[in-house]
């Protein structure tokens, strides 16, 4: 299981792929269904959409 939060290294965030089991350590845990990345100029934003319908967002 991969823990996703602001302390997760960028290398780990980039290696997450569909089907990986991830958690945000609070209430969101599940398999990754889709990954979106964007850059807002200040942060790189990772949105991990889970099969449960929830989304884990990490700004790095």
Image (cartoon, rainbow, N blue to C red):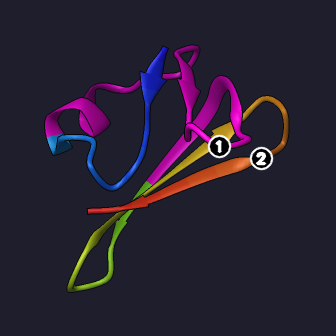
Residue positioned 54% across, 25% down in the render: 22
Image position, residue 41 (x, y; %): 22, 86
From what the image shows, is residue 30 above or below residue 39?
Answer: above
Residue positioned 24% across, 30% down in the render: 12
Residue 27 falls inside the magenta stretch: yes
Assess whether mark 2 and mark 1 are in contact (beta carbons under 8 angstroms). no
Tell me where residue 6 sits by quadrant.
Answer: bottom left
From the viewer's perspective, is 43 left or right of 34?
left
User: Magenta segment, which residues?
Assistant: 11-36
Q: Label 1 to label 2, Cα distance in Å?
A: 13 Å
From the viewer's perspective, is 16 left or right of 32?
left
Image position, residue 51 (x, y; %): 78, 29
Question: Quick one: label 1 or label 2, which is nearer the N terminus?
Answer: 1
Q: Nearer the viewer, residue 59 or 17?
A: 59
Q: Which residue is mark 2?
A: 54
From the viewer's perspective, is 26 left or right of 22?
right
Query: Which numbered disc covers residue 26?
Result: 1
Disc nearest the viewer among 1 and 2: 1
Characterize the local packing of mark 1: few (<14), some (14-19) or many (20 or more) Cα atoms within 10 angstroms: few
Characterize the local packing of mark 2: few (<14), some (14-19) or many (20 or more) Cα atoms within 10 angstroms: some
Q: Residue furthest right?
A: 52
Q: Secondary structure at mark 2?
A: loop
Residue positioned 27% across, 26% down in the render: 15
Q: Residue furthest bottom?
A: 41
Q: Nearer the viewer, residue 4 or 43?
A: 4
From what the image shows, is residue 51 above or below residue 21?
Answer: below
């Amino acid at each position: 299981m991969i823990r996703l939060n602001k302390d997760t290294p960028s290398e780990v965030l980039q290696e997450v792929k569909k089907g990986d089991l991830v958690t945000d350590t609070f209430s969101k845990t599940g398999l990754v269904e889709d990954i979106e990345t964007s850059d807002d100029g200040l942060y790189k934003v990772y949105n991990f959409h889970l099969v449960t319908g929830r989304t884990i967002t990490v700004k790095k």
